[in-house]
Image (tube, rainbow, N blue to C red):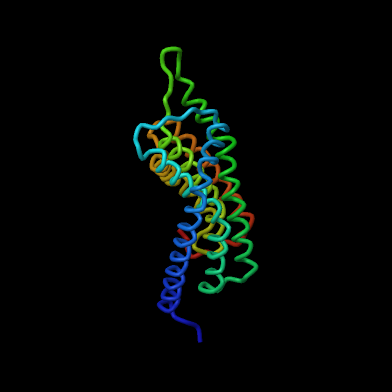
């Protein structure tokens, strides 16, 4: 006998509670381990981005290393988190194991593609551009805490926003709406992307917003294309 929507929701909430608890435990433990290696990570970031850092408070170095450890823990835990999510698709929502495996591998590939693109392309270009205003009489003094915030937030954000094509394809796969719906509401998507870029970027200047907003829009268009390829059927719940 098929279970009701209420029963499915209860199972989903139970699975979500267990998933969040396990994630919190793993995240805390891995952060503690990485904290002892964080000075080496910080030295590597300084060398990669060619920056000399300073601190302006007694606790700032320790907090910066803790934040860096947290970012590293999130990045390293991504395969496990996505694997548990794919299990939830099978156990709770009844998806096939093949489809859940494709979801996990695609999400993992996109997440690491986003972080690597940010680390090797977006951040070096953005930092060099923003520091290009220095002169003989105006030299930058970068606080280690703000530097870690800037780099960490961009890495995690880019890893997440690279999931947009997969999310759009997943929505179309569930027959909630079709690729043409995303195309029809492109203007609203641009507005939402601008708001997201303003919220996620550490500083409110136009350049930082563009660094995140432009890739977001490109990924949105890529998501429409992939959704049309993967979901050629036009039978959807949303007919508007």
Compare residues 94 and 144 and report the one nearer the observer. Answer: 144
Asked whether the viewer can see residue 92, the reply is yes
Q: Residue at x 51, y 40 (%)?
A: 39
Asked whether the viewer can see residue 191, the reply is no
Q: Position of residue 188 (x, y in %)?
A: 42, 46
Q: Position of residue 124 (x, y in %)?
A: 55, 31
Q: Position of residue 160 (x, y in %)?
A: 51, 50
Compare residues 153 and 32 and report the one nearer the observer. Answer: 32
Check the image and name the residue furthest to the left: 57
Q: Residue at x 60, y 62 (%)?
A: 233
Vertical placement of 71 versus 212: above or below? below
Residue 163 in the figure: left or right of residue 12:
right
Q: Residue at x 40, y 77 (%)?
A: 6
Residue 126 in the figure: left or right of residue 204:
right
Q: Residue at x 48, y 58 (%)?
A: 29
Question: Looking at the rendering, which quadrant does residue 56 occupy?
Answer: top left
Compare residues 201 and 72 and report the one nearer the observer. Answer: 72
């Amino acid at each position: 006998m098929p279970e009701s929507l209420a029963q499915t929701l209860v199972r989903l909430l139970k699975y979500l509670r267990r998933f969040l608890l396990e994630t919190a435990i793993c995240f805390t433990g891995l952060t503690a381990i990485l904290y002892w290696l964080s000075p080496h990570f910080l030295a590597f970031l300084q060398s990669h981005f060619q920056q000399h850092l300073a601190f302006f408070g007694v606790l700032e170095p320790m907090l910066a290393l803790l934040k860096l450890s947290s970012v590293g823990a999130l990045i390293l835990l991504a395969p496990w988190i996505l694997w548990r999510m794919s299990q939830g698709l099978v156990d709770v929502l009844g998806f096939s194991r093949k489809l859940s495996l494709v979801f996990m591998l695609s999400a993992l590939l996109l997440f690491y593609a986003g972080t690597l693109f940010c680390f090797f392309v977006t951040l070096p270009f953005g930092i060099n551009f923003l520091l290009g205003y220095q002169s003989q009489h105006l030299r930058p003094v970068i606080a280690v805490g703000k530097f870690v915030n800037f780099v960490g937030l961009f890495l995690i954000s880019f890893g997440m926003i690279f999931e947009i094509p997969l999310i759009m394809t997943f929505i179309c796969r569930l027959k909630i709406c079709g690729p043409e719906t995303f195309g029809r509401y492109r203007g609203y998507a641009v507005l939402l992307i601008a708001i997201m870029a303003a919220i996620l970027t550490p500083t409110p200047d136009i350049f930082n917003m563009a660094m995140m907003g432009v890739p977001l829009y490109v990924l949105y268009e890529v998501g429409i294309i992939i959704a049309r390829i993967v979901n050629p059927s036009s039978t959807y719940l949303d007919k508007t």
